[in-house]
Image (spheres, helix red, strand yellow):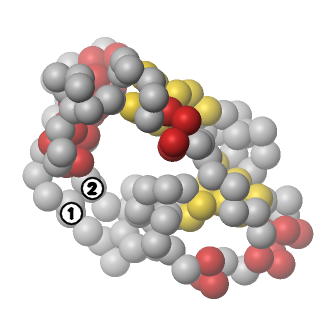
Amino acid sequence: MSERQLFDADAIRVIERRTAFIRRADRSTLVLGSAQDAGIVDTAATAHRGVELVRRRSGGGAVLVQPDRAVWVDTWVPRADPLWKDDVAESSAWVGRWWAEALGAADLEVHRGGPIRSRWSDLICFAGVAAG
């Protein structure tokens, strides 16, 4: 099992302007949240199917990223930026509004409240609703 990070958080902390990192998978990858137990994954089955197993530094559930089927976008806002907020839910709201505008759907409702959990939320990312 590979424990490589999706990005080097220490390397981006020196960036002084807001930045979006667009990442594409070059192979099928199952990305576990920072607190997920790797024991939930059948590593023999993932290896047999050529799926790499990695862990991201943020929490949440697992995400399957496949080449040409998903684009992973990380956003970085330095502490000195006016958009920076200590509250992750509040800071996610502007990202949601940004995506809605970029998709030409400015009237799209962006969730601003607390998480809405489902029975799958701890296991699978996007199985619930969160801010942004």
The kind of residue tagged 2 is Val
Determine if residue 98 is in view. yes
Where does residue 126 sit, x and y in percent of width and height?
Answer: 40, 56
The kind of residue tagged 1 is Ile
Q: Residues within 10 Å of mark 1 (few under 14, many from 20)?
A: few
Answer whether labels 1 and 2 touch (C-beta < 8 Å): yes
Q: Residue at x 78, y 39 (%)?
A: 26
Where does residue 88 sit, x and y in percent of width and height?
Answer: 23, 48
Where does residue 16 sit, x and y in percent of width and height?
Answer: 38, 20
Q: Which residue is mark 1?
A: 116
**Residue furthest out toward the right:** 48
Quadrant (top left, top right, bottom left, bottom right) of the C terminus:
top left
Q: Nearer the viewer, residue 49 or 88?
A: 88
Q: Residue at x 17, y 38 (%)?
A: 85
Determine if residue 100 is in view. no
Q: Residues within 10 Å of mark 2 (few under 14, many from 20)?
A: some
Q: Secondary structure at mark 2?
A: loop
Q: Quadrant of residue 72?
A: top right
Q: Residue at x 44, y 35 (%)?
A: 13
Q: Which residue is mark 2?
A: 129
Quadrant (top left, top right, bottom left, bottom right) of the N terminus:
bottom right
**Residue furthest out toward the left:** 113
Q: Residue at x 44, y 24 (%)?
A: 15
Above or below, 101 relative to 119: above
Q: Is residue 5 left or right of residue 76?
A: right
Q: Quadrant of residue 128?
A: bottom left
Q: Gap between marks 1 and 2, in whole Å?
A: 5 Å
Q: Secondary structure at mark 1?
A: loop
Above or below, 114 relative to 132: below
